[in-house]
Image (cartoon, rainbow, N blue to C red):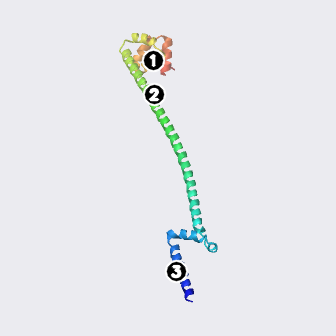
């Protein structure tokens, strides 16, 4: 009986030490791996719970990788759209700059022409009517209309007296003075 009690005490010690070691994180896997190799005990040991957690984590990692791939694709698409928009914006900026330059050039040219017409109108306004009529007679109709529209009506009327009838009718119609 003594021998049997020593065997039971030995088995209990092994079970207690095994139980304590089983719940230590580092030794749990080691004990499971050792016990699963024992034929009868392997039926009762199920390390699949940890494997299912690993499978679950692997599945979550794969899902996250898929989400990352989707987000990277969206980021690439958005970056492409942004670059396209930047390119269009730069093109429009260049067009605006070009149009502003062209507008400034046209305005400067118009200002110069206006100044020249005013100077010519001042010069013709200071001449006697007969000399002024000879100059206007040889001008293009549009330029003559611009000059005459700047002059005072009395001075323009004096000049009209010395113009040829055809030229006078033409210019008065273009000035809006004709009937």
**Would residue 27 be visible to someone looking at this image?**
yes
Give the residue at the far front of this rendering: 3
For disc 1, the marked residue is 143
Q: Position of residue 29 (x, y in %)?
A: 54, 68
- Looking at marks 3 and 1 on the same chain, the residue that comes earlier in the sequence is marked by 3
Q: Which mark is residue 58?
A: none
For disc 3, the marked residue is 13
Q: Position of residue 72 (x, y in %)?
A: 54, 49
Q: CA distance from mark 3 to mark 2?
A: 101 Å
Give the residue at the far left of this rendering: 126
Q: Position of residue 102 (x, y in %)?
A: 45, 27
- Can you tell which of label 1 and label 2 is closer to the viewer? 2
Position of the N terminus, as image quadrant, is: bottom right
Residue count near mark 2 (Cα–Cα under 10 Å), binned few <14, some 14–19, many ≥20 = few
Give the residue at the far bottom of this rendering: 1
SS state under label 1:
helix
For disc 2, the marked residue is 102
Q: Is residue 24 above or below residue 83?
A: below
Q: In front: 165, or 22?
A: 22
Evaluate if marks 3 and 1 touch, with contact meaning CB atoms under 8 Å apart.
Answer: no
SS state under label 3:
helix
Residue count near mark 1 (Cα–Cα under 10 Å), binned few <14, some 14–19, many ≥20 = few
């Amino acid at each position: 009986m003594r021998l049997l009690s020593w065997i039971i005490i030995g088995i209990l010690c092994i079970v207690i030490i095994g139980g304590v070691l089983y719940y230590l994180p580092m030794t749990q896997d080691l004990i499971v791996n050792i016990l699963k190799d024992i034929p009868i005990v392997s039926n009762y040991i199920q390390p699949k719970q940890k494997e299912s957690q690993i499978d679950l984590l692997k599945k979550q990692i794969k899902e996250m990788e898929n989400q990352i791939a989707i987000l990277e694709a969206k980021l690439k698409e958005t970056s492409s759209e942004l670059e396209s928009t930047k390119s269009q914006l730069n093109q429009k900026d260049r067009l605006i700059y070009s149009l502003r330059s062209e507008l400034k050039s046209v305005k400067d040219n118009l200002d110069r022409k206006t100044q020249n017409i005013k100077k010519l109108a001042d010069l013709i306004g200071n001449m006697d009517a007969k000399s002024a009529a000879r100059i206007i007679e040889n001008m293009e109709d549009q330029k003559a209309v611009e000059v005459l529209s700047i002059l005072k009506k009395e001075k323009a009327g004096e000049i009209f007296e010395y113009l040829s009838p055809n030229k006078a009718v033409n210019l008065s119609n273009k000035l809006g003075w004709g009937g």
